[in-house]
Image (cartoon, rainbow, N blue to C red):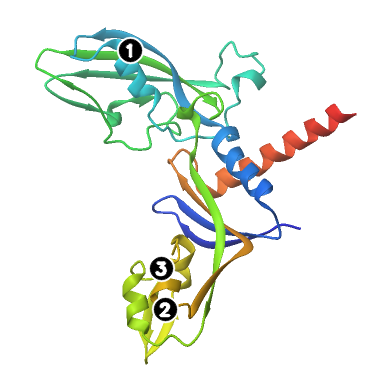
Amino acid sequence: MVEIEVVKADKKNNKLTLIIKKTNPAFVNALRRAIIESVPTMAIEDVELRKNNSVLYDEVIAHRLGLLPLTTDLGSYNVPSKCKCNGEGCASCQVKLTLESEGPGIVTASEIKSKDPKIKPVFAETPIVKLLKGQKLEVEATAVLGTGKEHSKWSPGHVWYKNRQVLKIGNVKDPHKVADACPPGVFEVKNGKLIVNEDKLLITDLAGLAEEASNGEITMEKSDDFVMFIESFGQLDCKEILEQAAKSLDEDLEEFEKLLK
């Protein structure tokens, strides 16, 4: 049975650090891929520019709008291919957004108006285009649910993992030398002894520095546990991303089992 331990949940910065035990690289990598490719989020898919006399071409502005992370309400919307409208477009699978601005000034994501207050740009101060005096921008856009396997704009975040490092510390003759040779915060010296900051060690790759600086008194081994880091782009929180990825994996395995029969 796979075990997952939450080491650090930073809700302010949308980051999550996990330790995954009793598993193998194949499972951890499958989970990583599911997070990147299979978790649905909301993003702008269709853009109608009704007026644009800015310096940027219509295609450039449409591209910028498409890459804006939007807050996502998975309980209220369906992926178009699984919607009752069969992907034709309805209130259950898409939401309309509008943008009207006149220069001079920088148009930001905060000026986008959504028909659903739950669906809005994650980062309100994201610049879209600079308008000079007399220049105008009028846009109507349609946002839909999608997944990262279709386009990276639907990917919910960045995720990576590594084997957990395990240090064995022997009789270190010069602990200050080791602490200074390694990345800041990993080691500290107290009463002449070398103390390891386990939280820092989780996110740092020592790459042999400790062994070299200690003349072999410190050895590093890679355990069977894995450390996974998830950074959300803001559409969903990290916990929801992880839950949706696990759900997607279950669905894929069920479908695979049916195909085998």
Specify whether 149 is left or right of 233. right
Q: Position of residue 191 (x, y in %)?
A: 37, 92
- The image shows residue 251, relative to residue 85, as above or below, that is below
Task: Please give the residue where the numbered disc 2 appears in the rendered image.
Answer: 214
User: Which residue type carries mark 1?
Assistant: Glu
Q: Residues within 10 Å of mark 2 (few under 14, many from 20)?
A: many
Split into 4 quadrants, where in the image is the C terminus?
A: top right
User: Which residue type carries mark 3?
Assistant: Leu
Q: Earlier in the sequence, mark 1 or mark 2?
A: 1
In the image shown, does 176 or 229 lie closer to the viewer? 176
> What is the C-alpha distance between the residues marked 1 and 2?
57 Å
Residue shown at the point (67%, 17%) measured from the top left = 84
CB contact under 8 Å: marks 2 and 3: no
Q: Nearer the viewer, mark 3 or mark 1?
A: 3
Task: Please give the residue where the numbered disc 3 appears in the rendered image.
Answer: 209
In the image shown, does 213 or 148 lie closer to the viewer? 213
Residue furthest top in the image: 50
> What is the C-alpha distance between the residues marked 2 and 3?
9 Å
Q: Position of residue 104 (x, y in %)?
A: 11, 21
Specify whether 99 is left or right of 201. left
Split into 4 quadrants, where in the image is the N terminus?
A: bottom right
User: Which residue type carries mark 2?
Assistant: Ser
Residue furthest bottom in the image: 191
Q: Position of residue 5 (x, y in %)?
A: 61, 62
> What is the C-alpha distance between the residues marked 3 and 1?
49 Å
- The image shows residue 154, relative to residue 213, as above or below, that is above
Residue shown at the point (73%, 35%) measured from the top left = 251
- The image shows residue 109, relative to residue 6, as above or below, that is above
Q: Secondary structure at mark 2?
A: loop
Which disc is residue 59 wearing? 1
Q: Position of residue 253 (x, y in %)?
A: 76, 37
Residue furthest left in the image: 133
